[in-house]
Amino acid sequence: MPREDGLPPGTLTMLILRVLAAEPLHGYAIAQRIHVLSGEELSVEEGSLYPALQKLLLKGWVKAAPAISQTGRAVREYRLTASGRKQLELERATYQRLAAAIGAVLDTA
Amino acid sequence: MPAIGEWFRRIWYLLNRGRLEAALRAEMDAHRAMMGEPARFGNTLQLREQSRDAWGWAWLDGVVRDVRLAIRGLRRTPVFTLVATVSLALGLALATSTVSVVNAYLIRSLPYPESDRLYHVRYAPPGPWEPHGMTGLDWTSVEDVVEFPIAASGEPYYLSGGGRTLSLRFLRVTRGFVDGLGVSVAAGRRFAGQDFVTGSEPVALIGHSLWRDRFGSDPDVIGRLIHGETESRPGTPETFRIVGVLAPGFYYGRDSRAGVELLVPHTSPVRVYMLRLREGIPPASAERRLTEAARRAATSPIPDDWTGVQLESAHDRWVGNLRPVLFGITLAVSLVLVIVCANVAVLMLLRSAQRQKEIAVRLALGSGWRHIARMLLTETSLICAVALGAGVAITALVLAALAPVIETQLGRPAPSASGITIDTTVLLIAGGISLLVAVSLSLAPLTSWGRGLTNALQQDGRVASEGRSMRHLRSGLIAFELAGSLVLLVGCGLMIRSVVNMMSTDFGFNADGLSRSRIMLRARNYPDAAAYRRFHEGFVGRVADATGSPVVFSSWPPFVPPPNHLIQTDERDAGVIAGAISVSSGYFSTLGIHIRQGREFTVQEASAEAPVAVISETLAGRLWPGASAVGRRLRGVEQTAGGSNPGPWRTVVGIAGDVRQTYDDDDLGEFYMPRTPDGRFGSFYVRSRRPVALLFDDLQNAAAAIDRDAVINPPSLVADSDQTLAGTRFLTFLLTVFAAIAAFLAMLGVYGVTAYAVQQRRKEVAIRMALGASERAVVGIFMREGALLLGVGTAAGLLGGAATSRVLRNQVFGVESFERSTFAIASAILLAAGFTAVFWAARRAALAHPVSALNAN
């Protein structure tokens, strides 16, 4: 089922893991970062972001810790764990293989 | 399949919900503030819920919500909730208790390892003689089917030293016994292979209770020697070295209360009466192999009609004859439980009729039927869960108080050492029953709703009129309750009659305060028969002097048919069969047996075994019809396997009243011979008001004053040995309780339904009364409806009762299976109570003021 924000299913997790791989971020910053990095093509809805974050927490791929944002607000910062990094590599490889395969079909057929 | 870590986190989330939710909320608020355009941030509540769903406890939230709703719904109808919960709790308590008993006797196995592979061996059915030579059966030839041949021979062992001589339950056992029954020790060591070798040092294991009572649980008792002699080898002292103490509760035989007190190895081969089969060996094939082996071992000619060796499961042998009683009780309890459920179902129907509007509103607002069903199921499950908890608690209390009584009443302790308890099996079965109850109860209102519901909303302000199917269902349930109650009432009536018949049975003797015991003497103290006799006569005199209680000897206990002799007279050789009993002087007066004519035996006749006899009235009438038997001559011929053995000719000196040995004893011919015991054993009766324990002391003192080595068995009350009456009484008590509960519930149902009908038709009644109908006429309307219900219920109940009386056929005594008066009385009680309930409910309608009734809505 395509999502309202246009992301193929499963990719949001990967994107969150990817932006967290660079540095720990809070929820709003994650959404912003994805939005900016995608050239403002992708925008992550809060309705997707928070359930996805809860899932990542449960899986043990990210950890949350209280922090203060640049604007001086109390926020929760999410940090990638070792198993999260592993998961990111796995998903990235799978995605790239899949994208290459789809691309090959699209180019030659 | 989620990883374990994830599950831990899930549970951690569940436990810290409150904190985490607050954190999530704060986080979202911050997000929203940072976005600076709040309108775009969706519904926070919904978002939070979606996020929470990711934690994986959505279903739990649903359950909690359902339960909260159900509690709210139940609290709105407190009377219904209370009545339903209490009656279900009682019903489930009854069911759980029964399941505990059935579990203890029929499901749980004997307290031996692999006890499902233990079998009793029968070399021949009772009747044709057992083939000789079975002791020499070669068990190694059947090693591939029989894992352990188990053999033991038991007899009393008289332990000497330390005051009075003690009689111990003593068993010589084979190696197979120790391995096959998994004999284990609480202290010391088990028997080893060399203990079974002839010529090795005699060793013994002592029972746990003997260790505790006689040796004060002294661990140093191991290694000590015990001295005594066995009954079969009087005058031959046998000494054993104690090597261990048996695990507590170890027993062998048919009574787990009579534990083994002394266990020693058997060094010579004995006949095997029990065995443990190898795993996976069907008993039928083992029987074939054993039959072949027995044929090879037989040293006597085998009869043509020999059926071969038969195996009977040890567990079956233990509880087999309790099955019908337990089955009957289970059936009765199931009926009571179903009646309880029917009653709660009726209450639910009445309640649901009043909730039609609520349900209709819910449906109109978009709840699906599934939601409604879920709500009902939650409500009934909640009631059932509380009822189950209460029921199990009640059962625990009841069993704590009554388990020993139940064991006594059933005539046998539960085979497992732990007795009747609530274990996992019981809890699982009880849980299953309550689940079944919950599901079937929530079905009741569902089936009745349906079409009528859409009308419910249109009927402004009034309680919605109900569908016909609903009314039928309700009446059907009530009729069923009535029928079930009648079935139980009939059963209880038959049992009560049976007990009355039994209690009023004249046994021909007076069991009041009468006890029975046995003396055992040591052979080396008595050179001849006269010496024995002197002891016994002295004993009688001393007991009489010390306590004023008469003591008389008899060769036969009550409630057991005595051995038959052929009685011949001068006039006829053919003779008649009669039970023969040897008794001492004073027997008839002490037991309260009337002497109809002549006299009883004198002391001289008893000690000289004079050629005289006393015969029962029936025997006298049979031998000399219409003439006096006193002064006539007769003799008894003992019938044994070895041939007939005629006694001396005797002169009849007295005619005694008939004595019944058992309830169904229809052969009242008895033949008494005078005799004072002249051997090592003497069974005697004593009539005394003293408690049995004190009496035991008196008897022991009296015996010890003459012979310190004399052993007296603890006396037991003759009345207590009447197992048949005890069992019947127990069943009667249970059935009476069940019938009372069932009838009460049925009346509650009848009352409830009538009261509901009255309420439904309040307006109609008010109009009728305003128009001049009399109170009687109004009550009459409802009475007619009630009469139909009661009539149908009673008719069905009578049919069920006829079936019950067939089931009870073997449990009743002196009662015809279809006894009209019992059926009539039971129906009359039920109908009278039923009409009272209807009348009571209907009168309330008539008494209400018409105007208030019309204004009520």
Image (tube, coloured by chain):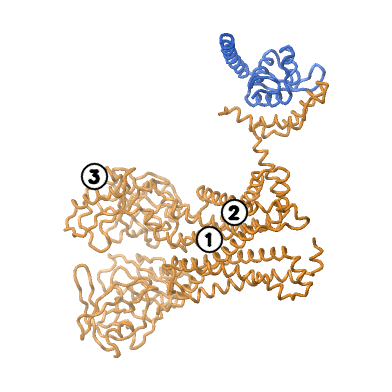
Chain colours: A blue, B orange
Q: Quick one: label 1, few (<14), some, or many (20+) residues within 10 Å?
A: many
Check disc 3 and report its element: helix, strand or loop: helix
Q: Chain under label 3?
A: B
Q: From mark 1 to mark 2, how far is it between C-alphas?
A: 22 Å
Query: What x and y, as percent, mark residue B560?
Result: 35, 70
Query: In this orientation, which residue lies closer to the viewer: B772 or B384?
Result: B772
**Left or right: A74, with B387 as reference point:** right
Q: Mark 1 vs mark 3: same chain?
A: yes
If the image is split into quadrants, where does the C terminus of chain B sit? bottom right
Residue extending farthest front? A109
Query: Mark 1 — residue?
Result: B335
Q: Which of pointers 1 and 2 lies earlier in the amino acid sequence?
A: 1
Report if residue B696 is visible in the image.
no
Residue depth check, mark 1 versus mark 3: number of the one nearer the observer = 1
Q: Residue B678: x, y in percent?
A: 28, 72
Can you identify the residue that label 2 sits on?
A: B393
Q: Which residue position is annotated with label 3? A: B140
